[in-house]
Image (cartoon, rainbow, N blue to C red):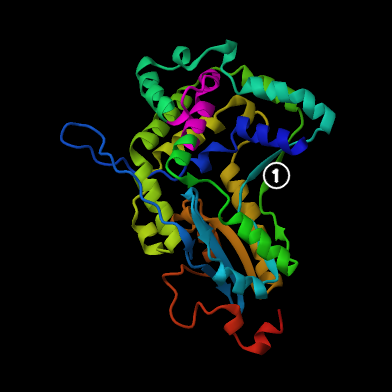
Amino acid sequence: MRRMLGWWMSFLLGAVPGAAMAQAEPPVPLDGDGEVVDMAPVLVAGVQPGPGLWRVSKDDHVLYILGTQSPLPRDIDWDAREVREVLDEAGAVLGSPGLSVDADVGFFRGLTLVPSAMKAMRNPGGATLDKVLPPELYARWLPLKQQYMGRDRGVEKKRPLIAVYELYKAALDHSRLRQGGVVGPVLAKELKARGLESTSTVLELKIEDPRQALADFRGEALKPQDLQCFAATLDVIEQDLPRIAARANAWAVGDVAALRAMPRNRRQLADCMDAWVQAEAARKRGFTDIEARMRERWLAAVEKALAGHRVSFATMSIDTLLYDREGYLAALAAKGYRIQAPDELVEGDGESPSEEAPEAAATR
């Protein structure tokens, strides 16, 4: 129950949708009549290697990082051969950076808060989307909702940010793309087989007053940022699913060069993140400077692992590894670490730990 309430608080106060909807690309071209070109995505299937590992090193200590991607093709099985070789020698395993909101309540008190959480997801006063959205925006929403969610009436009563996120997830499912379930289960199995545990690098925030936080969120009016996020996400669903599929395919087959070459459009992610962090219920409870605090938490864990072990392993969004807009890799480089992408390694640099000299491996 505590975990469930923490998830609700994370969602309602801004910790969820941005990353989940961040894989959008620039709009596809329109044809001569101004209609969206219909490009049904074709996805790879079966056993796929995924990308190679990034390498962070100083002296004889190395951190290998797997860049993760969401969404991915639904019908692939990830071949974790390279990761297995690293885990055979790893002394530390680090989870991906992120944010966790903890509503520190017991089971029975948690039960009493679930109705409040459900109400906070709905529009104030029980209004439906056709009453809170501008007519032109609702006219775009309705056919997409009918296409991907059918006759779901409940979603019409939810806040625009939550409704459009559910629509996005339904569109991914319709396109045979999935969020999660590809890399995580494989890693969990490999760690268990070796008696390893993953160290969390997640920034943890605690909500001292979950009932009041839910009440505050429930009372907040629709903001301009909410509408911007809603419209930008409809753009993604209407036009960008083929490009999202292409990115998922490139990750699956391990084509890092193709991933790097794909242009990025951060408008939708920026709009949605701005909408969530501008929520007064989040700001008054210290949900500020989140990116910087997440980065500091991750960097501290990485430096500790590198100092204490010759070989370590970590996961991180492949977007961060490719573009580093949040400054994770730049901060490591400033401290003297050498950073190499899998397609930048020269012969001899990227050898797996098992290929090193026995005396080096023995000192881990």
Residue drawn 22% across the image and 37% down it: 30
Q: Position of residue 155 (x, y in %)?
A: 53, 23
Q: Quadrant of residue 82?
A: bottom right
Task: Mark yes or no: residue 337 visible.
Answer: no
The answer to if 150 sits in the magenta stretch is yes
Q: Residue furthest left?
A: 32
Where residue 309 sits in the image (x, y, percent)?
69, 73
Dot 1 amino acid type = Glu
Q: Residue at x 56, y 33 (%)?
A: 277
Up/down of 259 relative to 238, above or below: below
Answer left or right for 86 relative to 246.
Answer: right
On the image, numbered disc 1 is attached to which residue? 204
Q: Would you identify the image quadrant in which residue 115 lies?
A: top right
Residue 175 vs residue 1, the one in the foreground: 175
Residue density around tag 1, few if under 14, some if 14–19, many if 20 or more, within 10 Å: some
Q: Is residue 132 left or right of residue 181?
A: left
Residue 104 is drawn in which quadrant? top right
Image coordinates for residue 223, horizontal then vertical, percent: 49, 21
Secondary structure, mark 1, is strand
Q: Residue 149: x and y, percent? A: 47, 28
Magenta stretch?
148-169
Q: Image check: 308 left or right of 183?
A: right
Question: Is residue 129 shown above or below 169?
Answer: above
The residue depicted at 62 percent of the width and 88 percent of the height is 357
Residue at (68, 19) in percent of width and height = 215
State how many labels appear. Answer: 1
